[in-house]
Image (tube, rainbow, N blue to C red):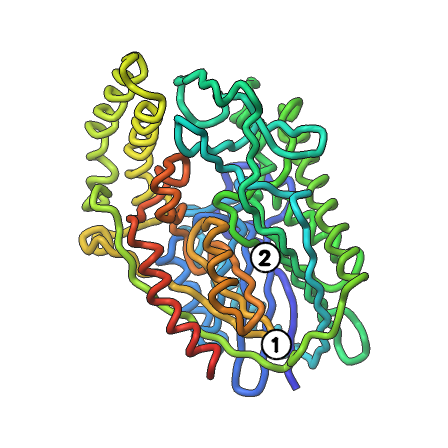
Amino acid sequence: MAECSFSKVSLKGAFEPVWDFHTDLYCRLLYLRSQDEQTLFCVFDTGLTWSADTRRFRKEVSEKCGIPEKSIVFHELQLHAAPGGLSIHNGLDTIIARVAYEVNKMKSSAVPYTCEVAEAYMGTEYSFNREQYVEGLGGVTVWTGMGFDEQGKPCTRDEGIMLLRDYRPNLETLKEPLYFDNQNDPLAYMFLFKDLKGNVLGSVSRFAAHPDVAVLFELRPVEGKAQMYRYDFDWPGYLSQKLEEEFGGTSIYMNGPCADLTTKKGYDGIDDFVSSDAECKRIGLSVAEKIKAEFIANKRPLKNADFLRTETFKVTVPMRDDMPKTVEEARNGQREKIEKAKNIFDTYKTDPSKTPSQVKRTVDEYYKAMYNGPMVYDICGFDDETLAKREVEIDIPCVRFGEYLFVGVPGESLVELTTWLRATFTGSKTIPLDQCDGYYSYVATPRSLTLGGYTYWCSWTTRDTIPELQKQLVPLVRKFLEE
């Protein structure tokens, strides 16, 4: 009979803190074994961990714990009030040691389980797609400041929150509210594990929205923001805390795509950390209550709960030619490109012969020039070999558990990738998870590269990157599902 165990490990003291802690931050762990298979989900209250570090983590935890490297999933929630990148890199030895120690205890304490599952249709009550096309302008993204109409639909006329720098096109199309009603991922899930006596061991929940609420104050026009930051597990932490109180055991939240999906969060009056954290709590408890209610109403035994298969696939996809060619160039060779892009924007925005869409493209090109360097040495941690090849190797974990297929998608992915996964692999109920096995920044699709906007200039992808990923992944996962 299959066995499982849950636990969580504090990350306090594992990295050099630059802020005080408001809440603890964790690596939340689920260990499963069945016949000759094992898997380990490691879910971190962090963001931006480099793929080289996640590979080292998986390799060393595998060696210390006897779990195949292919069966270890490193998933992080992209919390904005949490460490990432260099902080995790420097603390990796401690993190590995803590996790490995705990996992070995979990292996010894794993017990047979039963599992119930429920799927919840969340609609548009809790999240929305923050990207939209503006006629005559192009694609725009809104981080914060979104308004909502009487029915709670997200909308705005405010060009100042659309990441256009100081350009205001004053378009006729924006005299009426622009609705941000593109597709979201409305599905949430909850799995509840019990031992054979009926005691709750833990739960796994999954939704899809960006956990960036604890730092809402940083986008407000207030003084003293630099002193307000605190480490905070954001709304997913409050969600897990609530589910632990309601059901018992250890609760683990896993996040779906969060590149273009954000929570329905406030803005006016959220001027400090205290009010930002209160908004985290409001959202987390609200989502938890909805998932709890759906679970109680619709729970059913998981089919084939003993069935477990795991694999991690590698795909190699192209990188943009205009990315820096070395880490040194990324650090010290971008100033001229940034200045050139700024001058073009300054010229275009005051030239009446230029259309708003032409000016908007110069905004995107300026931001792209600004982002190219940090994307290499800070955000993604690319090395000289990767930059020279103009190719990126991506690890994509897949876990078959009962009737479900968990697929780890790279970086901050768009909801259209989730839709594609569910439509392509219909033999199982597919649950996409964002930011697995390394941070790859925003993974722009051909559509988002056409529209421009935040995803465009935060991405290293070409128009062929996602099609190539899909082309390579389809036969691998189909064979995985057939075996």
Q: What amino acid is labelled 2 in the image?
A: Met
What crowding class fits label 2: few (fewer than 14 Cα within 10 Å), some (14-19), or many (20 or more)? Answer: many
Question: Relative to 332, does residue 69 appear above or below in the rendering?
Answer: below
For the N terminus, the image quarter is bottom right
Q: Position of residue 467 (x, y in %)?
A: 34, 57
Which of the two discs, 1 and 2, sits closer to the camera? 1
Name the residue tied to disc 1: 402
Of helix, strand and loop, which one carries label 2? strand
Q: What amino acid is labelled 1 in the image?
A: Gly
Residue at image point 76% right, 61% down:
295
Residue at image point 49% right, 58% down:
95
Q: Position of residue 314 (x, y in %)?
A: 35, 67
Of helix, strand and loop, which one carries label 1? loop
The CA span between labels 1 and 2 is: 18 Å
Q: Position of residue 189 (x, y in %)?
A: 66, 60
Residue at image point 23% right, 28% down:
335
Q: Position of residue 383 (x, y in %)?
A: 26, 52
